[in-house]
């Protein structure tokens, strides 16, 4: 049985960044285990892009994660010589009274976060691609932009390996057993004895840690791409990432998100209906990347209402998944039965932007026993069981 200092289960979003951070500690023997290929097309990080927001409407407790993650994204970008982050800006659009817009504005002003406030005329003049309502305002997060998740995960994995970490793919962890001398990690290709284990298995977490099954669930997340008439108006140098909220005449609210063109012919744009209040657990091993013809027709109609220049038929689409927990907060905690096991779960579909700082946080919790980046709101005790 091979002895290691730290074993990370999962080499995806959080796992790759934790491995990268751990690998910079030259005194540690670090191993990463992932059940899937190096690039898992059915992973939670699939989908070409993720929004990067530095004005985080989920709350000021993420402000420090913003600064740390931004520095680390630049560091990984320099180390890997890959383009990971396009800081093209992140634009929030909507009526000033809607909760997300109000909170975003309050946070930006209270903490003096870099931003520009655009009135309806300025919004339309600066970004005529949209069709803002007469009372809409825009809040431009000038440090925000778009991340390339597949490229970023690969960069984190490769950086960890360059620093001496061992990564093993297509290897499944089947059991964790507490021993006096360490945690025995059983895999399909042998066993390890680890001083510390970090479980960053994403939507597969509750399979290895069934005690988390009542606290997290895997939900499907759809992505669609639409083609504009003039792609030059949607490239990162002129078009930001965006979130658009709208109140319709019947009082219903709608929510869009989108990113500039990264492929040269289309933009990623999604329309969010109201989330289900019931559990909707999906099997992350199944191929989820399918929309029905009716859904595509509906999405096409809706996205054209947000950006009139878009053709009303999506040119491609896919489904991925992520784990959700209560309180719209991720969970980072130690296993009650064995505090040598740390776990991360419940990124709520919005956590990729902070994976670098989460990796740093988990590394500090392993090496130093605690981290200034950890918050009480991240504990399992702060979450209610899902119903």
Image: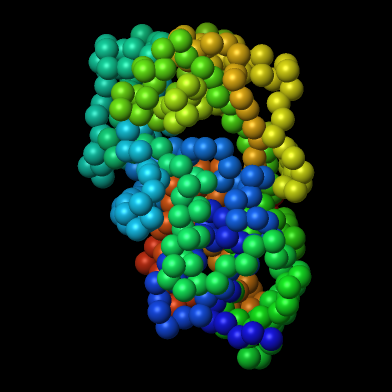
Q: Nearer the viewer, residue 79 or 223?
A: 79
Residue 244 is drawn in which quadrant? top left
Q: Is residue 200 left or right of residue 358?
A: right
Q: How is the image coloured?
A: rainbow
Q: Is residue 150 left or right of residue 325?
A: left
Q: Is residue 42 left or right of residue 376?
A: right
Q: Position of residue 48 (x, y in %)?
A: 52, 37
Q: Position of residue 130 (x, y in %)?
A: 40, 14
Q: Position of residue 180 (x, y in %)?
A: 66, 91
Residue 21 is drawn in which quadrant? bottom left
With respect to residue 255, does 219 lie above or below? below
- Check the image and name the residue furthest to the bottom: 181
Residue 23 is drawn in which quadrant? bottom left
> How many tags in the picture?
0
Q: Residue at x 47, y 74 (%)?
A: 164
Q: Nearer the viewer, residue 313 or 298?
A: 313
Q: Nearer the viewer, residue 47 or 198?
A: 47
Instruction: Identify the image quadrant of the N terminus.
Output: bottom right
Q: Residue at x 50, y 53 (%)?
A: 154
Q: Residue at x 61, y 46 (%)?
A: 44
Q: Is residue 151 left or right of residue 240?
A: right
Q: Residue at x 38, y 14 (%)?
A: 129
With respect to residue 6, does 352 lie above or below? above
Residue 211 seen by the camera: no
Residue 206 seen by the camera: yes
């Amino acid at each position: 049985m091979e002895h290691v200092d730290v074993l990370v289960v999962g080499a995806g979003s959080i796992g790759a960044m934790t491995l990268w951070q751990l690998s910079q500690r030259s005194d540690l023997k670090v191993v990463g285990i992932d059940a899937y290929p190096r690039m898992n097309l059915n992973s939670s990080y699939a989908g070409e892009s993720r929004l990067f927001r530095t004005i985080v409407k989920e709350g000021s407790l993420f402000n420090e994660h913003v600064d740390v993650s931004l520095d680390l994204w630049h560091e990984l970008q320099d180390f890997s010589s890959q383009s990971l982050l396009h800081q093209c800006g992140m634009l929030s659009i909507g009526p000033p009274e809607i909760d997300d817009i109000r909170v975003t504005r309050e946070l930006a002003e209270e903490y003096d976060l870099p931003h520009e406030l655009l009135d309806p005329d300025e919004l339309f003049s600066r970004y005529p691609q949209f069709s803002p309502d007469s009372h809409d305002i825009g809040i431009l997060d000038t440090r925000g932009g778009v991340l390339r998740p597949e490229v970023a995960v690969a960069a984190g994995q490769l950086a960890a390996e360059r620093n001496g970490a061992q990564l093993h793919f297509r290897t499944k962890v089947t059991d964790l057993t507490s021993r006096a001398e360490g945690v025995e990690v059983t895999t399909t290709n042998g066993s390890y004895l680890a001083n510390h284990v970090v479980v960053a298995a994403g939507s597969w977490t509750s399979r290895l840690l069934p005690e988390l099954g009542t606290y997290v669930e895997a939900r499907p997340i759809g992505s669609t791409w639409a083609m504009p008439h003039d792609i030059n108006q949607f490239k990162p140098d002129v078009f930001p990432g965006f979130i658009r909220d709208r109140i319709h005449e019947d009082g219903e609210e709608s929510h869009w998100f989108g990113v500039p063109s990264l492929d040269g012919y289309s933009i990623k744009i999604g329309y969010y209906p109201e989330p289900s209040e019931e559990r909707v657990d999906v099997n992350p091993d199944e191929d989820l990347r399918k929309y029905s013809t009716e859904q595509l027709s509906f999405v096409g109609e809706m996205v054209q209402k947000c950006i009139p220049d878009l053709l009303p038929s999506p040119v491609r689409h896919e489904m991925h998944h992520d784990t959700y927990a209560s309180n719209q907060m991720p969970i980072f905690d130690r296993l009650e039965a064995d505090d040598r096991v740390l776990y991360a779960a419940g990124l709520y579909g919005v956590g990729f932007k902070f994976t670098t700082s989460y990796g740093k946080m988990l590394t500090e919790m392993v090496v130093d026993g605690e981290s200034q980046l950890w918050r009480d709101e991240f504990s399992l005790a702060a979450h209610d069981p899902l119903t």
